[in-house]
Image (tube, helix red, strand yellow):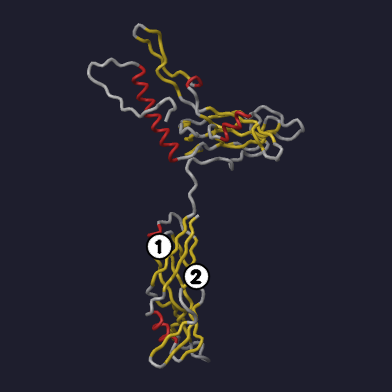
């Protein structure tokens, strides 16, 4: 809240009350303070939307598009129409190299705004009733410090950038009053706090489906003879639903089958040893992925088809891990 405001007050009015300018301005100030408090609580200083800056090597001016930004106090810095700013008229550094500048935007004070409308008062001189709000753009000169890091020459500007009262939109390299390179925007700070990686791990029993494919086999020695379809078993597969994790984009999935190895399948007195290969992911999306598990026979007294059928009925447990950046 405003430092001068000690309490949150609800303004009330009654019929016949005499209103003063301070009463109406108090309403505006209260709404503004609560809005700025909201901004400070849920956002950080930076660009919320827009403020695209265009400037190519050799240009003498840059164009700033409409945008919305917040400073550290929560004040909204709003630009409603494109703005053209001249490149700083400097030839470069004294040693002959290019000069560096940060293009910044800040919230304007009332005395920095244009009077949009004035009115005559009742028995009072004309007064301002509307100010046209425009953000303040500033080229901040930079130089290398002792650590070979570019830093604002003006200490006040350096402090305002550091504390989030000036928002950096782009960095310019200027030589002979022109851009010596395209504008760089890597230093832009976003008003939305960066999302932390989302990590989710689950173990679940799965009813597996057979993973196989059909191939055509022709009798040897008869190339033109009728083909026979043969079913080849490769292992197991299953579509795994990850909707509950709430991923916004496709994460990086990994999966494995839990349990002892090798896998022994028994049917009466017959037994077979199977070995499952590494599980791999196919067709990943934010809400699902296909898991494929190849299976080979190490030693067995049962047919492969019978063994994998028996094994599939045991509901292998699948553990999957997903990381969303």
Mark before the other along the chain sequence, 2 or 1: 1
In this orientation, which residue lies closer to the viewer: 307 or 264? 264
The residue shown at (48%, 44%) is: 193
Residue annotated with mark 1: 242
Q: Quadrant of residue 34?
A: top left
Q: Position of residue 186 (x, y in %)?
A: 59, 43
Residue annotated with mark 2: 280
> Would residue 68 be found to the left or right of residue 59 on screen?
left
* Category of crowding for the residue at label 2, using alpha-carbon neighbours closer than 10 angstroms: few (below 14), some (14–19), many (at least 20): some
> Would residue 95 be found to the left or right of residue 205 on screen?
right
Q: Position of residue 265 (x, y in %)?
A: 43, 85
In this orientation, which residue lies closer to the viewer: 159 or 177? 159
Kindly give the residue lying farthest to the right in the view shown: 95
Kindly give the residue lying farthest to the bottom in the view shown: 269
Q: Position of residue 2 (x, y in %)?
A: 43, 28
In this orientation, which residue lies closer to the viewer: 35 or 216? 35
């Amino acid at each position: 809240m405003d430092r001068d405001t000690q309490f949150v007050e609800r303004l009330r009015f009654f019929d016949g009350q005499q209103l003063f300018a301070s009463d109406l301005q108090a309403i505006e100030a209260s709404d503004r303070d609560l809005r700025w408090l909201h901004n400070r609580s849920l956002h950080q200083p930076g660009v919320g939307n827009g403020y695209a800056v265009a400037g190519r090597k050799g240009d003498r001016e840059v164009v700033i598009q409409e945008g919305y930004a917040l400073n550290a106090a929560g004040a909204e810095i709003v630009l409603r129409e494109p703005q053209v700013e001249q490149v700083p008229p400097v030839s470069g550094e004294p040693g002959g190299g290019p000069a560096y500048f940060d293009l910044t935007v800040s919230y304007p004070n009332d005395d920095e705004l244009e009077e949009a409308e004035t009115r005559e008062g009742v028995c009072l001189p004309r007064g301002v009733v509307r100010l046209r709000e425009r953000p303040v753009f500033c080229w901040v000169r930079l130089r290398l410090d002792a650590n070979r890091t570019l830093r604002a020459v003006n200490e006040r500007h350096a402090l305002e950038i550091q504390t989030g009262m000036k928002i950096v939109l782009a960095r310019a390299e200027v030589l002979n009053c022109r851009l010596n390179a395209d504008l760089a925007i890597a230093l832009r700070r976003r008003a939305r706090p960066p999302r932390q990686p989302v990590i989710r791990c689950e173990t679940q029993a799965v009813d597996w489906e057979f993973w196989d494919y059909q191939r055509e086999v022709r009798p040897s020695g008869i190339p033109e003879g009728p083909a026979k379809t043969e079913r080849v078993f490769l292992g197991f597969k299953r579509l795994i639903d990850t909707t509950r994790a709430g991923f916004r984009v496709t994460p990086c999935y990994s999966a494995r089958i839990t349990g002892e190895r090798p896998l022994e399948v028994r049917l009466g007195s017959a037994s077979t040893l199977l070995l499952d290969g590494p599980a791999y992911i196919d067709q990943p999306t934010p809400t699902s992925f296909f898991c494929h598990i190849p299976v080979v026979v190490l030693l067995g007294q049962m047919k492969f088809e019978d063994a994998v059928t028996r094994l599939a009925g045991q509901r292998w447990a699948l553990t999957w891990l997903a990381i969303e950046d």
